[in-house]
Amino acid sequence: AHCSLFKFCLGMGVFARRGRHSQLPFLQRNGQHSVVSLSSRRRGQRLTSSALQNFLRFMIKLLAACFVVYVFGATFFRVFRSRRPAIAIEQTHTVPIDGEHHLLVETDDTNDYDDVPPVVKGDDYDTSSMDHDLLDSFVKSTRKPLYKSWTVDPEGNEMPYDINNCPEVPPDNYPIEWPLLELIHNWIPDDTTFPSLAERPSIYQGLCRFDYRTEYHKAELYREAELPFILRDDPQILSVAERWARPDYLSSLLGKDTRYMTEYSESNHLMYFKAPKGKRGRGDNGRKEYTPPITQIKMTYDEWVDKANQPDEEMGPDKPHWYFRVSAKDKKENDIMFQEMPFFKSKTNFYIVDKEDTRGINCRFGMKGNIAEAHYDSSRNFVALFGGERRYILSHPKNCRNLALYPFKHPSGRHTALDWSAPDLDAHPEFADAKANEVVLQAGDVLYLPTFWFHHIISLDFNWQCNARSGDTDHYSHEVQTCGL
């Protein structure tokens, strides 16, 4: 805008200057009267009209004023565009890395990974002026290296597809599943601390990971086929991850004094339950006393952060754990969470398949060690991780008979009754036949879970997760119906 203004003023100035000789009428003194001559041929004659001289002086002043405005405007524009909120990469507090809270990736000297993402250099970051490359680089700087994956199938043969370069047409028997006992023996769910990155276990990943820039069309095809997958580095997701990584951003957003529903457990297991109807405090059709597995309390975000930032020895499996919750009800699009995540609004887009049947936004912020027991949801589910890491153990709905589920009418119905870190096979021998695969979600990842897919969730460190559900599908209805669900 200021460039256009300057060009206009410059043009007017040139016009005024040329008018002295050719464009403007000139005044010629004739005795006591002034006579206006419109002829432009007498170029040599000198203009003597005081009115015209005043006009030229005015135009010169106008040109000078325009120049001053241009210089001032250009300077202000550069300063305004260069201003960014303070998001120093070196700041601590938000993204825990190996027990400490840094935005920079820290690796151990014994780390044998050579694919550590580059660290972004610079002081301040502002997603409003960031392009995809900058957002991508920033969020990568908060991630640990990817977990190595097993490259053989359950029969010991080479994997029939590359999880990082999957074909457009979903392969047969996708996603591959391994014996569930093999997964949990390889990596016990209670175990979330390792001496170094190099000593982390390899994982049994059967899900495809699609890059948003180059493989978005593949993600659409897998979603249409109602198969689970991971979409990585959507700039909409990265933008949220970048904002939430800023020191004190979430604290200010959620309010210093506002209290939110938080789940409390005396261990790391935070089992869902729905209070029995009728006689309160009684379950199993009222035959015996029912004790809820967790307690619902209210606390501020800052209070929860203090709990989540305790030393590792205070967050063991037998220590108290808190699961912080923030929700936005469906249709209330002025809610702060819908403002943060407009892609989860009730409008058809990649993440909202059925805008007529949405469930709002549900955010669960996890501290290290939190376990949400295996369960399924009765609708499509997109799960986005904006910071930290979460391990998801996934199981096809056809495995429902082998997952030791509570009865449908139980307060914790559709959830497993077993502690997967120490399953009681004497009580539930069928568990030995269960199949599963797993994935570790990192900042910028979105996991798609079709209706009825089982998922067992372990928080590996301080993390922020939000999900949105929309509509359902009958692709797997028969499997769960055979289990009485």
Image: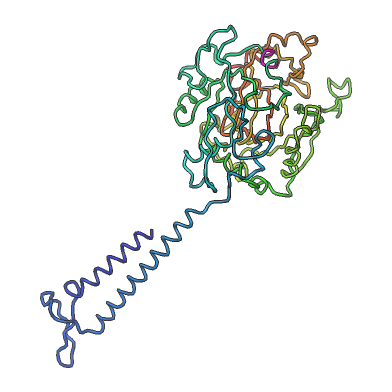
Measuring 33% from the left and 74% from the top, which residue is drawn there? 61
How are the residues colored?
rainbow
Q: Nearer the viewer, residue 92 or 241?
A: 92
Query: Residue 138: x and y, percent?
Result: 54, 39
Magenta stretch, main secondary structure, is helix
Q: Is residue 349 left or right of residue 359?
A: left
Residue 277 drawn at (x, y percent): 81, 28
Q: Quadrant of the N terminus?
A: bottom left
Q: Residue furthest top?
A: 155
Tell me which residue sits at (13%, 81%) in the image: 45
Q: Residue furthest left?
A: 41
Bounds of the magenta segment: 180-184
Q: Is residue 263 above or below residue 448?
A: below
Residue 321 occupies which quadrant of the picture?
top right
Q: Horizontal and vertical percent for residue 58?
A: 31, 76
Quarter occupied by residue 199 = top right
x then y, percent, for residue 162: 50, 18
Magenta highlight on residue 128? no
Q: Is residue 183 magenta?
A: yes
24 in relation to 97, above or below: below
Q: Nearer the viewer, residue 253 or 412?
A: 253
> How many numbered marks are there?
0
Q: Quadrant of the C terminus?
A: top right
The quarter holding residue 7 reads bottom left
Q: Residue at x 56, y 37 (%)?
A: 141
Left or right placement of residue 316 versus residue 123 in this view = right
